Amino acid sequence: MDEREISIKSLHTLDAFRACEDLQVQVWQLHDRELVPDHIFLTSVRHGGVVLGAFAPGDAGEKMVGMLFGFPGLGDETFGVDRLHCSHIMGVIPEQQSKGIGYRLKLAQRAQVLQQGLKLVIWTYDPLEGRNAALNIGKLGAICRRYERNLYGDMRDALNAGLLSDRFEVEWWIDSEAVRCRLEEGKPETGRVLDAKAANRVTWYDGLPVPGDAPAAWKGEPALVEIPADFQHIRRVDFALAVTWRLHFRALCEAAFAAGYAVVDFASTVENGMRRSFYRLEP
């Protein structure tokens, strides 16, 4: 399906919010008690929240293939703003992923939040998920300087069950020159070159990336940090290695953030038939 056939709409009705419940099940295989329910969507939208749906044409009419939900929040001294927008969930059904729908949902969210007079959108994601990093950091221009250990505790969905739910909390300064330039440039996250030295050493065994040494100190120079190109594949075939990656990346990021670094970019490339993915960190 052509991306241009997808329409993005603000949602306001209970029927639409119940379709958002169904979509959460399709995307994350959630149980009922884990869903964001329709009445939360309704209450939030009545008081400044944003609920968006992505719709594809079908034989029986439009079908929801993606959704996004966020709500207003208060800032703190870290962010330097009194009010912000908390982007809670965004998902696209599996057969429509990697088609730019998530990007369009985020752009629609940005437009609505700017109309509310807010300048900052925050959300969390698993930093070892390269696809999410490519969108959040690489395409949208969000940054990160906060690492949260096991933020959501034990999760039961198909993507997270059994793993520590460590997360990046990212900052998307939606009216900043840096974000405007990133969006205007429209640079793809694949094939870009992030010019800096690698901070962690990764070796390959049986086609899987294995983390090695992390830097003993952060010395004020830009650095690249490599992550697996497909963390879910590692989780499926070698769960112990997935745990090793989680703890390796946690230690590395916590040390970097404590030294005043921030994640500012993400890109991936193919070398010798292997896809390699990198965050760029700068002081």
Image (cartoon, helix red, strand yellow):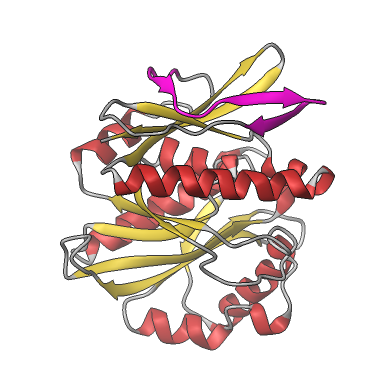
Residue 228: x and y, percent?
Answer: 63, 35
Image position of 272 (left or right of 107) = right
Looking at the image, is 9 positioned above or below residue 39?
Answer: above
Q: Which residues are magenta?
A: 193-211
Residue occupying image coordinates x 20% and y 44%: 176
Residue 100: x and y, percent?
Answer: 55, 41
Q: Quadrant of the N terminus?
A: top right
Residue occupying image coordinates x 41% and y 49%: 254
Query: In this orientation, which residue lies closer to the viewer: 257 or 26?
Result: 257
Query: In this orientation, which residue lies closer to the viewer: 252 or 29?
Result: 252
Image position of 238 (left or right of 67) = right
Residue occupying image coordinates x 70% and y 47%: 242
Residue 74: x and y, percent?
Answer: 25, 74
Residue occupying image coordinates x 31% and y 49%: 258
Looking at the image, is 76 positioned above or below residue 168?
Answer: below
Looking at the image, is 36 positioned above or below residue 267?
Answer: below
Image position of 235 (left or right of 87) = right
Query: In this orientation, which residue lies closer to the viewer: 104 or 69?
Result: 69
**Residue 121 visible (yes or no):** yes
- The image quarter containing residue 248 is top right
